[in-house]
Image (cartoon, helix red, strand yellow):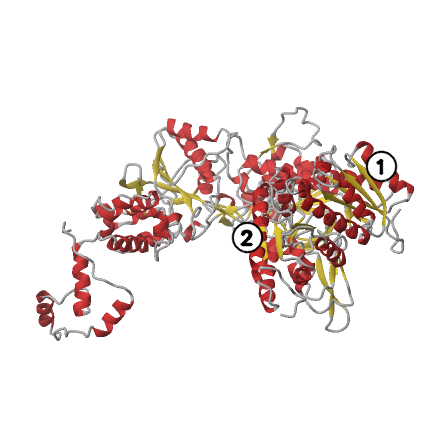
Amino acid sequence: MSVSKMEQPKVGVFLSDCGKQLSEILDFDALTTFVKGVSNVALIARGSEFWRGKGLQTIVDAVKSGKINRVVVAENITKISDVNIAQAVENAGLNSYLVEVLDIKDHCAWPHRNAPKEATEKAKAMLLSAIERAKLLEPIEKLEFPALKSALVIGGGIGGMQTAVDLTDLGFEVKLIEKQPFLGGLAARAGRFFPTDDCAICIQPPSSDVKTITHTSRKCVYRSGFSEIPNLNILTNSSVVAVEGVPGNYKVTVEKKPRYVDPDKCVACDKCVSVCPVEAPDEYNSNMTNRKAIYINVPAVHPQVYVIDEDACKFNDCAKCVSVCPTNAIDLDQKPEQVTFNVGSIIVATGFKEFDASVIKEYHYDEYPDVITNLELARMIDGFGPTGGEIVRPSDGKPAKKIVFVQCAGSRDRRYNPYCSGICCMISLKNASLIKEANPDAEVSICYIDIRTTGREHEYYYERARDMGIKFIKGRPTEIYADEDKGKLIVDVEDALLKRFLDLEADLVVLATSMVPPEGTSELAKMLDIDLEADGFFKEYNAKLRPTETKQKGIFLCGGATFPKDAPTASLHAHSAALKTAKFLNSGKIVKDLRTAFINDEYCGDCEFCPVMCPFGAITLEPTTENHFVARVNDLLCEGCGVCVGTCPLNAIELKNSKQNQIAAQIDALLSVNGTSKPLVLAICCQECGHTAVDSSGMAKMEYPANVRVIKVPCAGIVRVNQILDAFKAGAQGVMIVGCKTDGCHYEIGSENAEKKADSAKVLLKEYGIEPERLEMFKMVYIEGAQFAEAVQMMTDRVAKLGTLNLMGDS
Amino acid sequence: MFFSEEVTCRHGGETLTACYQCGTCASSCPVARLDSRFNPREVLNLALLGEKDEILSGDAIWLCTSCFNCQERCPQNVEIAELIFALRNIAIEAGNSPNIYADFGGALIADGRIVAISKFVEKKREEFGLPPLKPVGVEDLNKILEATGFTKPEKTEASK
């Protein structure tokens, strides 16, 4: 049953005294009498608590009887009781958004326990404000949006493959696309992994693999049955070119480059490769060797189907491969094709790549062949690699006996990448140990700034490396140069611990290059309308709570797409992304409270403020007549923060659950009851960190002046300058805006916007003859209750010093 | 105030705390290889650790040739050469500077040059057929020096 707009509000007010302890401070009889005098109050009940048990039943009964159609509860543990009461009221047949709960203990009785009279007056103001808001509340409906039970995974590296396995195991249809002709990504080229020392191509097989009978099973990708998962569609050699639609139903267009070999016919017999006369650099082996124009990366790769290198192949001028193929699998006339399909959600698993070390001129990476990167070294260590596992000098192919690693090549470097890539220390320790294991006579040194081995078992790698006789030199080399007489490279470094300058001779210098986002990252971010961090990696919505989510609720991230990761972390991340996707799509629908923004077409038009400011991309512009347009809110994307409301120059956009008239009625009510000798200060608090800071000060029984009046809004970003002026007009002597910390704002930019607005409001206040310091923006988090108490004291003292503001006077 | 703050609030000293002691500056430094009294990494570490007296009374900061190799190579964009200037300024204010700086200052005020015209220079110019150096007017210069608060560094007893 929803309340029709025509029906008169009948407010039930439930006053909890928290086991009579609140009535020892507040005058409950006075409160009852006060509430009775407020219009539209149909019922007043007093009790110990109303959020559970008998108390809650009282509310439920009153709602069911039809005696009341709005519920106001003065409770003592609001944030829990809010949820409980709303649910019970909904079950009783009244929309849960017709409930207003106020915290009479932590926001009033406790902090003002030594000023009971003032506290009682404040409680009256709080009750009046809640009742006035309740009267104006409107039911908020729920809407269901369909969600396809399918997902697209972009990137076939270790993260993408793992997440695809998880999702297909859970029954979702999965499309996995990989830009390269073969799966595996960067991880497959790394050879061995730490800390498990196993092969890079080893994965946890899908449950559709009937031969996987043990819980502990792990297999190489090519024998895991990964490619045969019935609900998995793998598209290699493919890239996303367009994405449209909404969470739950994205229309994706993928471009498939021609492979020129039919996977259904190819039997991997190697005949084509042996007759191919063309050689081209083998990028899988970092161009350290050549491969044929028709090729397969390494034997254990997926798919076990050859591919033709378009840039190298002579096509019909040669066609030797076509003539020898026993199954007629090769088609040199294949064209690129576009495929379009719909999925419920998208998981970005695009990983990272090695930084181009040639930018660091003093290391001469592009000049000296014997300066290589860790990935190139990993290819050399790999038995399938260009040297068959031998560590050699690329310049002359002779065995490398003296090897120097240079850490942080491009990482922790403000000129290139200021961040620590996090995995390079372990990669170097692993590779150095593998070299030493195979060639105990090799002289291996690692030049480092700090060795970072923070994971479990990681310190062991450092320990083992010292045991093996690997030398550690604390110092970042300034230059690598060639000593042509000796035919060696020289690494010029200061050993800071010995305070000695070293010219280390080396056959091979290995740069532990930083890891950076791969090409196409920003284009993909644009296509998906998700953000990147300053480092260029995809932005995780909240590093602590939502590490695999983005601001778009249907788009998830996993693995190295958010930051360089080792394999165990990428794997964990992949499981998390799969779980988040499954949770999102599982019921086949997305249910959403429409606590969203709506447009008043009468005022809206021809301005672009709200679509630009909306942190969630929920607002678009729709043409009306020629050269004119209005804003439109996408209910599915809108998070109900109200940043748009605060931005609109014309009051043309509102939040359904925090309308302007509701906020205005609350401000008027809060400021209409004083009862203290002190000037009233209005604190406009965001419902997240700001309001909880008020909670925590009360919970900790901190005391502050009772002349502060708190109003809760969804986000500080909703605050409008006219509301601030209205507050002063209604009698506030000071106004505080309390929001989250800038970086911790729950709605990205709300707090920051509020601060800017407060600054511009100050200018306006001055124009109106109001001292600008009567307005102040504060940013705090839950644990900073003491800061809230201090801020109230400060504002109270400040406005007392300024004297009474007389806006109606003749001055 | 911590000494590191005293340095960072000065012109040229702002980037001190970005230093993480990687030693790229030290291995870039042509002086450090030849004279163990100077090592830019050590100077920065002393500043970070607040060893003010050791920096101000020592020789190290005066040995830098301002070649800027270190600054060019520093991965943290620490302006090492500028930092050394800042430290020298602090030292001069504290009355700690090699006497040659007092000579430079005196020459600047008197002749408008930091290196006085010596017999050697005059002779060489003559050999090359160059005209003798004329004294320059110092009136305008001294106005600038006065406005900027430049005073001649005092000579200390222990001549350096």
- A464 vs A586, left or right, is left
Report the residue marked by disc 1: A58
- A248 vs A533, left or right, is right
**A142 or A555, which is in the foreground?**
A142
Chain that bears disc 2 = A
Please indicate, yes or no, whether residue A491 appears anywhere in the rendered image: no
Mark 2 falls on what kind of element?
Answer: loop
Distance (Cα) linking label 1 and label 2: 62 Å
Query: How busy is the neighbourhood of tag 2: few (under 14 within 10 Å), some, or many (20 plus)?
Result: few
**Residue type of the residue flagged with mark 2:** Glu
Can you tell which mark lies on residue A519?
A: 2
Q: Position of residue A9 (x, y in %)?
A: 86, 51
Can you tell which mark lies on residue A442?
A: none
Query: How busy is the neighbourhood of tag 1: few (under 14 within 10 Å), some, or many (20 plus)?
Result: some
**Residue type of the residue flagged with mark 1:** Thr
Query: In the rendered view of the protein, which quadrant contains the C terminus of chain A?
Result: bottom right
Query: Is disc 2 on the same chain as disc 1?
Result: yes
**B117 or B155, which is in the foreground?**
B155
Q: Quadrant of residue A204?
A: top right
Q: Which residue is located at x 80 percent, y 52 percent?
A: A137
1 vs 2, front mark: 1
Question: In the rendered structure, which disc, 1 or 2, sits on the residue that comes first in sequence?
Answer: 1
Q: Are marks 1 and 2 in contact (CB under 8 Å)?
A: no
Q: Quadrant of residue A459?
A: top left
Mark 1 falls on what kind of element?
Answer: helix
**B104 or A498, which is in the foreground?**
B104
**Outermost top residue:** A214
- A295 vs B108, left or right, is right
Q: Which residue is located at x 21 percent, y 53 percent?
A: B97
Please indicate, yes or no, whether residue A26 appears anywhere in the rendered image: yes
Q: Position of residue A530 (x, y in %)?
A: 63, 52
Q: Position of residue A245 (x, y in %)?
A: 73, 54
